[in-house]
Image (cartoon, grey):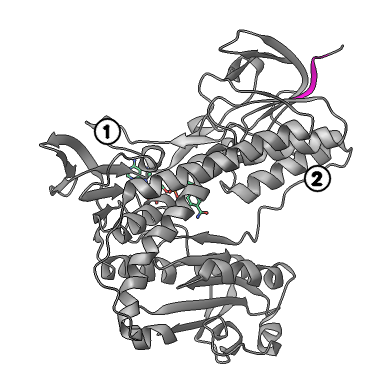
């Protein structure tokens, strides 16, 4: 049978674009369709614009700290529209590059929604064109989820947060995950009176407990009104703002409500049921270790599979799919030991197992923990401790978890990740000479274990 294309990719985000370009480099005839903007969530309304906003928000702390070092910063003001325009310019530049790179790789691009209509058939929704392909890759990502409460439509999500016409005087962010703590820190830094309402006892469920406790406290110290163990029940308009009702009976008056209550795979209406692709909770595409779905010739990578929802993982899954299908080299992605950062203020960098996970996996662990006042704070008078924590499995003395809360945590954990992925032991850390004065030197100077635990 002959097909129009060897590979048709639905979704031009991180995973889809990587797969399309790599498959083309192996000589495959490839097409890709994108219904919104080339670059996907990360480039258009995720990691990239978020990090630009994080940079903007951190000037607030820098201005405060500057006084202790002799600077008289004077009156400062912030222009939201200018930041949004600068962000828009940068993401347009990046989106253009994504499209150009696809073209240069010989990939045919369609700027419209595509849906699957048969085992090897795709329909382009706007033009009505039908296309056949030997292999289809679903890389459509995810979309924000809002809980079903009265007035939920009045709240925004991260999608809208990037393009607000004006910055509200106050905001309440609902949720306690990555997006919630990052956006609460951004709005707080930009001078918005910020509250965070989370249903759990400490933010960032699944992270190491010391990091969770440390960040929860630090958000409060930085001026965020952190409400824990509460869920929203209703939102209603009040004047220019809103009333947010919580299940503890309290009602928050707020200028804006933002839901950061998770994301769900973007599979609705894609036609997956018509071709027998098995889907799980919230419409995620179920795949095997090679990213193959239950239907022959149909694969899926990235957030739509809800494995580990991070850009570098989608990219790896896209590359592994191409190795498997177009280079005759079955390749599975290792989803363990992934360094990750949360760009809250203060920042988190984490890798490997939390203390509790390591205990249940290894049965016996040594914990090295240091909490200290960074040198910069001594002069700036900021009260905020940095936390560094190493989890070591007692028997083999391998470092199996590393958790940092403090400035530059993400940058530190990326580099440290190489050693941990290589299987470094605590003795290897001890062997490494400290770089002084730095915060990261603490990681190689923690000689005495804080405590050991046995399951
Ligand atoms: P997360 O899954 O991290 O967090 C969702 C939050 O919403 C959790 O705190 C959850 O509570 C809460 N929640 C879920 N449902 C409800 C509900 N019905 N009512 C009240 N609260 C609710 O999702 P995010 O949207 O923050 O981020 C999505 C993904 O994007 C992340 O998993 C991450 O992989 C990725 N990401 C990565 C970033 C980075 O690398 N820096 C930055 C941003 C996103 P509970 O904990 O109790 O379940």
Which dot marks residue 213? Answer: none
Nearer the observer: mark 2 or 1; the answer is 1
Tell me the chief SS of the magenta region: strand
Instruction: Name the spot of residue 363 as percent of width and height, x first.
Output: 59, 72
Instruction: Name the spot of residue 44 as percent of width and height, x first.
Output: 51, 40
> On the image, numbered disc 1 is attached to which residue?
152
Which segment did they paint magenta? 3-7
Q: State whether residue 41 appears in this view.
A: yes
Closest to the observer, 110 or 249: 110
Image quarter of residue 193: bottom left
Q: State whether residue 288 appears in this view.
A: no
Which element type, helix, strand or loop, lies under badge 2?
Answer: loop
Instruction: Work out whether 182 lies above or below 320.
Output: below
> On the image, numbered disc 2 is attached to which residue?
331
Closest to the observer, 394 or 318: 318
Q: How many marks?
A: 2
Q: Do the residues labelled 2 and 1 touch (CB within 8 Å)?
A: no
Specify few, some or many for label 1: CA neighbours under 10 Å numbering under 14, 14-19, or 20 or more: some
Instruction: Name the spot of residue 376 as percent of width and height, x first.
Output: 41, 84
Which element type, helix, strand or loop, lies under badge 1?
Answer: helix
Earlier-in-chain disc, 2 versus 1: 1
Q: Residue at x 30, y 32 (%)?
A: 148
Q: Residue at x 61, y 87 (%)?
A: 435
C-alpha distance separating marks 2 and 1: 42 Å
| The N terminus sits in image quarter | top right
Closest to the observer, 130 or 427: 130
């Amino acid at each position: 049978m002959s097909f129009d294309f060897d590979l048709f990719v639905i979704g031009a985000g991180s995973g889809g674009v990587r797969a399309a370009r790599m498959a083309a480099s192996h000589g495959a005839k490839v097409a890709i369709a994108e219904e919104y903007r080339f670059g996907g969530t990360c480039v258009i309304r995720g990691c990239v614009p978020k990090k630009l906003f994080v940079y903007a928000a951190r000037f607030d702390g820098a201005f405060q700290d500057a006084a202790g070092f002799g600077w008289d910063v004077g009156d400062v003001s912030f222009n939201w529209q200018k930041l949004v325009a600068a962000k828009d310019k940068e993401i347009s530049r990046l989106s253009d590059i994504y499209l150009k790179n696809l073209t240069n790789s010989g990939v045919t691009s369609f700027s419209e929604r595509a849906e699957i209509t048969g085992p090897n058939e795709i329909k382009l929704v706007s033009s009505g064109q039908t296309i056949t392909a030997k292999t289809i890759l679903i890389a459509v990502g995810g979309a924000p989820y809002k809980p079903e409460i009265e007035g939920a439509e009045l709240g925004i999500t991260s999608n809208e947060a990037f393009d607000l016409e004006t910055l509200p005087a106050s905001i309440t962010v609902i949720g306690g995950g990555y997006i919630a703590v990052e956006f609460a820190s951004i709005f707080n830094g930009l001078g918005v009176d910020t509250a965070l309402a989370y249903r759990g006892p400490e933010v960032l469920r699944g992270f190491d407990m010391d990091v969770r406790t440390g960040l929860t406290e630090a958000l409060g110290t930085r001026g965020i009104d952190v409400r824990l163990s509460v869920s929203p029940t209703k939102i209603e308009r009040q004047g220019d703002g809103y009333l947010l009702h919580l299940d503890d009976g309290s009602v928050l008056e707020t200028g804006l409500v933002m839901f950061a209550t998770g994301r769900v795979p973007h599979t609705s209406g894609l036609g997956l049921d018509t071709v027998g692709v098995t889907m799980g909770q919230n419409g995620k595409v179920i795949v095997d270790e090679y990213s193959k779905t239950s239907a022959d010739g149909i694969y899926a990578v990235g957030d739509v599979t809800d494995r580990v929802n991070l850009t570098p993982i989608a990219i790896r899954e896209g590359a592994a799919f191409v190795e498997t299908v177009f280079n005759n080299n079955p390749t599975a992605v290792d989803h363990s030991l992934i360094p990750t950062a949360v760009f809250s203020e203060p920042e988190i960098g984490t890798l490997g197992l939390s203390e509790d996970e390591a205990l249940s996996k290894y049965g016996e662990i040594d914990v090295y923990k240091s909490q200290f006042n960074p040198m910069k704070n001594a002069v700036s008078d900021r009260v905020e401790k940095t936390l560094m924590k190493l989890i070591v499995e007692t028997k083999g003395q391998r470092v199996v978890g590393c958790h940092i809360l403090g400035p530059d945590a993400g940058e530190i954990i990326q580099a440290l990740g190489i050693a941990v992925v290589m299987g470094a032991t605590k003795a290897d850390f001890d062997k490494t000479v400290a770089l002084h004065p730095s915060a990261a030197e603490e990681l190689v100077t923690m000689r005495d274990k804080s405590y050991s635990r046995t399951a």
